[in-house]
Amino acid sequence: MAVIHRTTLQPTKLELLAAWLPTREWYDAAVAAPEKAGGFRLDDPAGEVGLEFMVVGDAERPHAAPHLVPMTYRAAPLDGAEDALIGTAEHGVLGKRWIYDGTHDPVLVAELYALLAGRAAPQAQSESDTPDPTVHASLRGAAADGTVLELLRVVDGADRTDMVVRTSDAAEPVTLRLRRVLAPTAGDTPARGTVTAGWRLSDGATARGPYVLVPEDAEAR
């Protein structure tokens, strides 16, 4: 299980996101004032990479739709992922950390597929050794031992990021569609798999909706 250290991170994740978010085509503002509005973690079986799905609200636009940013935390640079680097920060316990957009990190993508297939358990965002039962995941047709063999490509859209993967239990590539702009419903995309979780609204209420979809449509690949 991942250990959540009660220590400092300089600069903070939100400070790094304030500079990075406006550079993304799916972010709908020129300036970001990010605040954490929910999310969950996954465990890296090797215990090397931190894996977090963070819902990001905007303190200056409280009624704007929240955005979803999966992040990975590494002790060394990830080869070939320079364009996915959100930034570096100094961790009070672990030292220098390289923080990446997790859609480009093979470890996060593999554990996301494991979550969909029922082989990984979602963890609380801010507590060590604490499962998060509010996160629901399912994938029709996935094998119990299905794994990601290769991350083929990552494609950003206006409100989503598609991770196209080759898996051990499917003849054709599978698209894992991360909803960058969260909404309580999935929109018009039929899905054979979903990861659904909640987030906080600006008025203190909560909402739920899909974080990730696996589209039915073969054209999504």
Image (cartoon, rainbow, N blue to C red):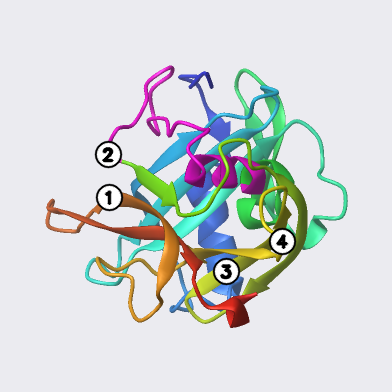
Residue 128 vs residue 214, the one in the foreground: 214
- Amino acid type assigned to the residue bearing label 4 in the image: Ala
Residue at left offset 53%, top offset 78%: 217
Q: Which of marks 1 and 2 is nearer the N terminus?
A: 2
Q: Are marks 1 and 2 in contact (CB under 8 Å)?
A: yes
Residue of label 3: 161
Find disc 4 in the rendering and name its residue: 171
Q: In this view, does 134 lie to the left or right of 137?
A: left
Tell me the amino acid under the disc marked 3: Thr
Secondary structure found at label 3: strand
Where residue 58 appears, as percent x and y from the top left, is: 34, 63
On screen, residue 193 versus residue 200, left or right, reads right
Q: Earlier in the sequence, mark 1 or mark 3?
A: 3
Instruction: Please state the horizontal and vertical placement of residue 176, each as a whole percent of the image.
Output: 57, 61
- Badge 4 crowding class, 10 Å Cα cut-off, few under 14, some 14 to 19, many 20 or more, is few
- As helix, strand or loop, the secondary structure at mark 2 comes to loop
Q: Name the one closer to the observer, 44 or 216.
A: 216
Q: Does the magenta stretch include residue 174?
A: no
Q: Name the residue under label 2.
A: 134
Q: Residue 198 carries which label?
A: 1
Position of 174 relative to 187 (above/below): above
Estimate the x, y position of residue 159 in percent, counting from the top left. 47, 76
Front disc: 4 or 3: 4
Q: Residue at x 49, y 70 (%)?
A: 215
Give how far apart the Cα atoms at labels 1 and 2 are.
7 Å
Q: Give the range drawn in magenta.
A: 109-134
